[in-house]
Structure formats: C-alpha cells, structure tokens
Image (cartoon, helix red, strand yellow):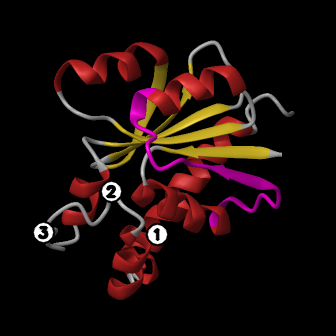
Amino acid sequence: MYRILAECYANLCFAEKLKEFLGIEEIKFIHKKFYGRDHVIKKAERLSNNLIVIVDYEEGRYRVFIEKNFNLEYVRQNILVGIRRGVKKYIAIVFDPNMEEFVKSFRIKLEGKELKSKEAEKFFEKLRFFEMKDVREILRKVAETALKYLRKDDS
C-alpha cells in the first residue's frame, strides 16, 4: 500500500486527483487540519517507503531542507518531483513556491485563504479546476515522473 501525506487541504485535493493518474489501487491519504510542511516531513521520516509527500517549497531559508534532502526535477515551471536521497520509494511532489502560485499560474484570482481550509475542495469544484485540460496534463506528467521513481528498483 502507498501513502500520500499532504501538507494542506489544497495539496490533498491535488493528491486525490493524482490517484487517477497513478494507477495505484491502494492509496491511503494522510492529512490533518494542522499539518504544516515541517510536520509532514517529520511524519514522513517515520514512514519512509511507499510514500509520496505533497508539500510547498516555500521561500527563503525554508527551502534548504528540501534542497539538501531531495533530488528533484521540474515537471513544470512551478512543480518539482523527486526522490528522498538515500531512501527508496519516498517521493516528493513540491509546489514552487506554493500551491497558491500554481493556481494563480492559470490566471485564477485568490482572495484569501480559500486553499488552506476545507473550503479548498469547494473552491476547486466551483472552478472545475481539475477538469481543465492543462491541469489534467500536469497531473499526468507528475504521475508519470513519480512512478518513474517509485518503480526505479523494481526491475
């Protein structure tokens, strides 16, 4: 079974849509209301395999942990996918610098914290965000890249 840890509600929505493209039947989603990026990373350290974390890169000094511990590649201008150095089957999907900027890249205006609460799901549904052709293509590319890392040592 694979587990996906999501930093915020918006990242959880992305994770749930990503499942369609991963083609993995057994996925357990892990998210709590007060998870932040650092909490997700710490929890991931205890789980460490068959794991995908979806987090924001953040800005400034907060980027250092991600840079030191993951080999990442850009899938799109503001999304990276990669593997935890020294740990097999621990994948990170990273929004650079955050999910809000990813959403804004589709010329969608954000007015507040609509992506940081349970309202994120309604926000995305209202816009039909994950049905947009470009977003579906990004989900496909992210899944393809994540699977490349997850399957790396299966041969």
Find disc 3 in the rendering and name its residue.
Answer: 111
Is residue 135 among what the camera can see? yes
Instruction: Please tell me whether mark 3 sits on a helix, a strand or a loop.
Output: loop
Residue at the spot x=19%, y=31% of the render? Answer: 59
User: Tag 1: residue type?
Assistant: Glu
Task: Give the farthest residue toward the front.
Answer: 34
> Of discs 1 and 3, which sits in the foreground?
3
User: Tag 2: residue type?
Assistant: Lys
The residue segment tinted magenta is 21-38
Q: Choose between 2 and 76: the one closer to the eye.
A: 2
Give the CA separation, mark 2 to mark 3: 12 Å
Contact, CB < 8 Å: mark 2 with mark 3?
no
Find disc 1 in the rendering and name its residue.
Answer: 137
Is residue 48 among what the camera can see? no
Give the CA separation, mark 1 to mark 2: 24 Å
Instruction: Please tell me whether mark 1 sits on a helix, a strand or a loop.
Output: helix
Q: Residues within 10 Å of mark 1 (few under 14, many from 20)?
A: some
Q: Choose between 57 and 44: the one closer to the eye.
A: 44
Q: Seen in the image, is 97 located left or right of residue 147?
A: left
